[in-house]
Image (tube, helix red, strand yellow):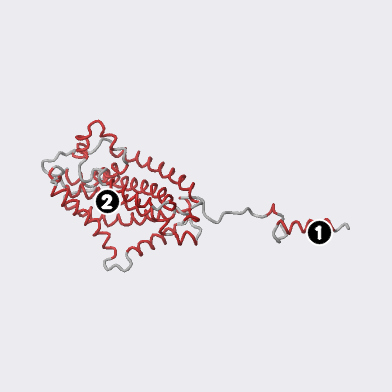
Amino acid sequence: MASRPSTQAAGDDREDGVGTGRSAATLPPLVNPAPSAGLLEVFRRRYLLKLLVRREISARYSGSFLGLLWSYLNPLSQFFIYFAIIGKIFALHRSVPNFAIHIFAALVVVHFFTETFNAGTRSIVRNKAVVRKMAVPLEMFPVASMAVSLYHVGPQLVILTIASLAYGWTPDPVGILAMVLALMISMLLGTALALVFSAFNVFFRDFSSMVNILTNFVRFGVPMIYSYTMVGERFGSFAPYYLLNPIADAVLLMQRAFWTGTVEGDPGQPADFAAQNLPDHLILRGFVMVGVCVVLLGLAQLAFRAFERKIPERI
């Protein structure tokens, strides 16, 4: 009779401990197998991010005869279209010295941002098979799209550098800093918007079409096919509000990095060409915009987390 309580207690331990002989208090807590650290988890799993980027690049050029050469041909074709139509037909190149460098420097930034935004918005839906089978941070897919877009920036910068050197451009430390800031703004803002819209796109596929429309306006909302001096002439006291657009600042920074360097050495052009044709304190504005984009990325992460748990069941 005295042994029954101990037997009963042992039975309770087996029941609580799921047959392990341990009490429930000694068992490790249950952990959700899906990663929940957000963007930090993405960079902890860099090996998986590399695999996704390689997979995306391989898929894009699979069965292609020219392969990576398309990364050079696509921006070149856009450049010649804008240069021929806007520069030659509308004769805007007459008021903008070295118009080819002016437009191509802007095109690098615009193309990086729009490709990140567009591809990132569709990234989760496009990888729905992986989402259903693997417990991966869902932020991995928009970030991988951004990395693929950044990969394609390389060939564009090569073309821009060669063309700028042909116009007499000489690299300078401030210009290099301006280029880095421009790419960071495009990268951070594009990723932030891709995070939010990729989650929305899971629930309503209309968002991918909406992004296509929104990005059409980007090219006309930045000083690419027209100069920044035209903004001040046309908008007057409202011109400072134009610079609240981070991509406009990124374009001006990239033009500071390349375009102004090709003009300042030309005869008949002022030595302080950048000061006369770009806004004041441009580098400082660049740092401020990078900070703003970091904050926007943090807010986008919070918004993404609000929808994250519902995505696998709606994908």
Between residue 126 and residue 254, name the one nearer to us: 126
Between residue 280 and residue 88, name the one nearer to us: 88
Q: Disc number at residue 251?
A: none
The residue tagged 1 is 7
* Quadrant assignment for the N terminus: bottom right
SS of the residue under disc 2: helix
Q: CA distance from mark 1 to mark 2?
A: 75 Å
User: Taking the image as drawn, is residue 43 in sight?
Assistant: no
Is the residue marked by circle 2 packed among few (<14), some (14-19), or many (20+) residues within 10 Å?
A: many
Residue 201 spot, x, y in % from top left: 41, 52
Residue 255 spot, x, y in % from top left: 24, 45
Q: Is residue 132 above or below residue 193?
A: below
Q: Residue at x 40, y 59 (%)?
A: 126
Q: Do tag 1 and tag 2 residues touch (Cβ < 8 Å)?
A: no
Q: Residue at x 25, y 36 (%)?
A: 279
The residue tagged 2 is 108
Residue 253 spot, x, y in % from top left: 27, 43
Q: Residue at x 26, y 55 (%)?
A: 156
Identified by mark 2, the residue type is: Val
Q: State the residue lying farthest toward the top.
A: 237
Is the residue marked by circle 1 packed among few (<14), some (14-19), or many (20+) residues within 10 Å?
A: few
Q: Is residue 117 left or right of residue 80?
A: right
Identified by mark 1, the residue type is: Thr
Q: Is residue 90 above or below residue 279?
A: below
Q: Quadrant of residue 49?
A: bottom left
Earlier-in-chain disc, 1 versus 2: 1
SS of the residue under disc 1: helix
User: Taking the image as drawn, is residue 135 in sight?
Assistant: yes
Q: State the residue lying farthest toward the left.
A: 268
Q: State the residue lying farthest toward the right.
A: 1
Residue 42 spot, x, y in % from top left: 46, 54
